[in-house]
Image (tube, grey):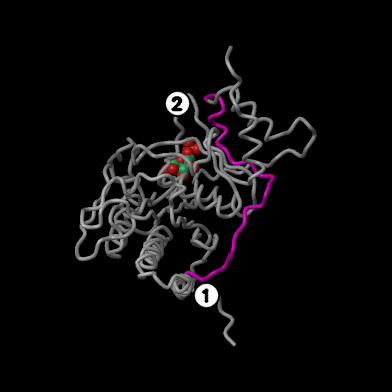
């Protein structure tokens, strides 16, 4: 009897069979992301050996310095998504404007958003980095080029989202119609194998993940809320701190272990640092599907309505009870 785990391709093909009307286009998009992540994983693992460490000397649309690996990862995903023939528009952290794909030879039924290499300032130091992505259904007329309206949709309308972490192993976590599942790359096979079926975020956790170096830039309410989460005054046990500084790695630990990841607004970044469309949105979709929660402190991230490709947002992500408690504690007092 066969005991090996399902491959990602087998899993997605089986899922497609639950939808007799499916054309296979969604399967192509998921396979495209899996292939892109395998290629990026290979290069990240060998980063110290090749030409891909260091900076390009360019700045992206957000003024951030572009690492060589950012550029490589973006090119890889743009190519794999374009080659699926199933995508009409692409939005990426590394693209100032979206890529709009033609209706011929086939009109793409989906649009794709991604942060090709999240945490890339860590890549030169062999610290885990990753890729975050989301898939929307097309909104523009099928006979036209895809457009920005295919990308600027609330995260609640995502039909799938996922991330890959390139760490001590490479893991791809996908939020699909039937839940959240993790697939670990078996390098000897070159295949992602189902290793974490039906993932659930614990309802509460003991880890707090936040860059406390920004403490002096936070509002008083945020400072008080973080202090209370660290060491509650009611005598509940103090939390332990973990902060990798790669969102995707911090989020993955939070998904498995529970607790709270925070990147609040601060005086230097009043709208927050993280990007709504291709960082916070897909992670919020995935966490909510796994029983966790994500808010900007005022509303669920899923209800935000992106106005531009590169909108930023504060992010409070993690176990449902911990997110609710932080949101309650960090409400700004009403001014009289
Ligand atoms: P990076 O600057 O390395 O690209 O997406 C931005 C991001 O990384 C996240 O991955 C990470 O969580 C955060 O910024 C780290 O920011 P700080 O260095 O300000 O803590």
Work out which quarter of the rendered image holds the C terminus and state it: top right
Marks 1/2: CA distance?
Answer: 46 Å
- For label 1, the residue is 6
Percent position of residue 184, x then y: 52, 66
Percent position of residue 257, x then y: 64, 52
Percent position of residue 121, x then y: 42, 44
Disc 2 beta carbon < 8 A from ligand 1? no
Going from the N terminus, do you reach mark 1 or mark 2 first?
Answer: 1
Mark 1 secondary-structure assignment: loop
Query: Against 83, is 287 above or below?
Result: above
- Answer with left or right where residue 110 lies relative to residue 224: left
Question: Quadrant of the rendered structure where residue 51 is?
Answer: bottom left
- The residue located at (68%, 35%) in the rendering is 230
Query: Against 25, is 138 above or below?
Result: above
Towards the viewer: 332 or 187:
332
- For label 2, the residue is 268
Q: Residues within 10 Å of mark 1 (few under 14, many from 20)?
A: some
Percent position of residue 321, x then y: 67, 43
Pick out the residue farthest to the top: 336
Towards the viewer: 105 or 53:
105
Question: Quadrant of the rendered structure where residue 222 is?
Answer: top right
Work out which quarter of the rendered image holds the N terminus and state it: bottom right
- The residue located at (49%, 56%) in the rendering is 165
Towards the viewer: 45 or 97:
97
Magenta extent: 192-217
């Amino acid at each position: 009897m066969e005991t090996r785990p399902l491959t990602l391709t087998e899993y997605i093909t089986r899922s497609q069979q639950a939808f007799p009307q499916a054309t296979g286009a969604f399967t192509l998009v998921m396979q495209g992301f899996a292939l892109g992540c395998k290629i990026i994983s290979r290069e990240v693992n060998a980063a110290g050996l090749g030409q891909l460490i260091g900076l390009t000397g360019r700045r992206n649309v957000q003024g951030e310095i572009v690492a060589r690996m950012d550029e490589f990862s973006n090119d890889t995903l743009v190519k794999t998504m374009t080659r699926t023939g199933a995508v009409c528009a692409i939005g990426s952290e590394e693209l100032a404007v979206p890529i709009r794909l033609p209706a011929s030879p086939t009109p793409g039924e989906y649009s794709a958003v991604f942060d090709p290499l999240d945490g890339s300032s860590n890549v030169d130091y062999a610290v885990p980095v990753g890729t975050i992505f989301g898939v929307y259904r097309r909104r523009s007329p099928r006979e036209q080029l895809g457009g920005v309206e295919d990308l600027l949709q609330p995260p609640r309308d995502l039909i799938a989202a996922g991330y890959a972490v390139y760490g001590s192993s490479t893991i791809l976590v996908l939020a699909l119609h039937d839940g959240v599942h993790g697939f670990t790359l078996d390098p000897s096979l070159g295949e992602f194998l189902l290793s974490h079926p039906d993932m659930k975020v614990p309802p509460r956790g003991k880890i707090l993940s936040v860059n406390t170096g920004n403490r002096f830039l936070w509002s008083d309410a945020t400072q008080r809320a973080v202090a209370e989460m660290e060491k509650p005054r009611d005598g509940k046990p103090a939390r332990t701190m973990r902060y990798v500084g790669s969102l995707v790695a911090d989020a993955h630990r939070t998904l498995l272990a529970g607790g709270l990841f925070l990147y609040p607004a601060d005086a230097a970044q009043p709208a927050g640092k993280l990007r709504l469309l291709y960082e916070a949105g897909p992670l919020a979709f995935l966490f909510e599907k796994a029983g966790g929660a994500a808010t900007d402190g005022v509303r669920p991230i899923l209800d935000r309505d992106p106005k531009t490709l590169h909108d930023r947002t504060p992010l409070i992500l993690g176990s449902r009870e911990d997110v609710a408690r932080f949101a309650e504690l960090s409400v700004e007092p009403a001014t009289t």
